[in-house]
Image: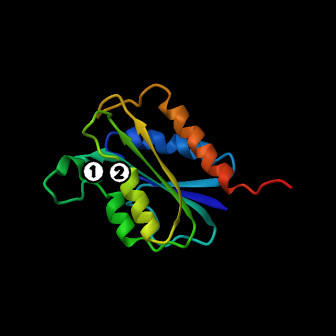
Amino acid sequence: MRALLVYESRFGNTESVARAVAAGLGTVVRVDIHTPASAPVVLGDDVALLVVGAPTHALGHGVPEGDGVDRYACASVRDWLETLHPAGIPAASFDTHAGGPFTGRPARTVSHRLRRLGLQLRGHESFCAKGVLGPMEDGELDHAQRWGENLAASLAPVPS
């Protein structure tokens, strides 16, 4: 049994949160971490949980390549989700943002897409950075690890 964690990161904030979430998940399951460029599009039978993380950019998530913002261009979660062939497994999403009233929350959008793909949504979470370039706000990486632990606990069989 393993978890697959796929994240998109431009400035390293989402990557640091992904690694903290993976540390929490790792208390129960093996975790494979990928960016969208290296993530599988067909989930193996041993994948018990899919976790997807995206940063907040331009009031949304993932700037797709070719839309004129080359300095941010990379493989996006949005593009990867369009090619994903999932099994009906549990899934969760998270995002990173710089706070303020004008930032979007891509975890909600990703969660809707995961649900439309037939995955069983276990929730979404947002983590706050100290500005666009980070680092993460104090306590947020601990928050991410606890969230990962809670996701992992939801997969663990309940002792009888």
Q: Please identify the quadrant where the N terminus is shown.
A: bottom right
Q: Amino acid at mark 1?
A: Gly
Which residue does the image show at 52% across and 39% down from the upper left?
Answer: 144
Q: Position of residue 34 (x, y in %)?
A: 46, 55
Quadrant in which residue 97 is drawn: top left
Tell which residue pokes out farthest to the front in this image: 101
Of the pair 26 and 107, the residue shown nearer to us:
107
Which residue does the image show at 32% across and 57% down from the upper left?
Answer: 76
Counting residues from the start of the chain, the first of labels 1 and 2 encountered is 1
Which label number is shown at residue 156?
A: none
Q: Secondary structure at mark 1?
A: strand
Of the pair 150 and 132, the residue shown nearer to us:
150
Query: Going by the image, does 123 lie left or right of 48?
Result: left
Tell which residue pokes out farthest to the right in this image: 160
Whole-angstrom CA distance, mark 1 to mark 2, is 6 Å
Location of mark 1 (residue):
60
Q: Position of residue 142 (x, y in %)?
A: 55, 32
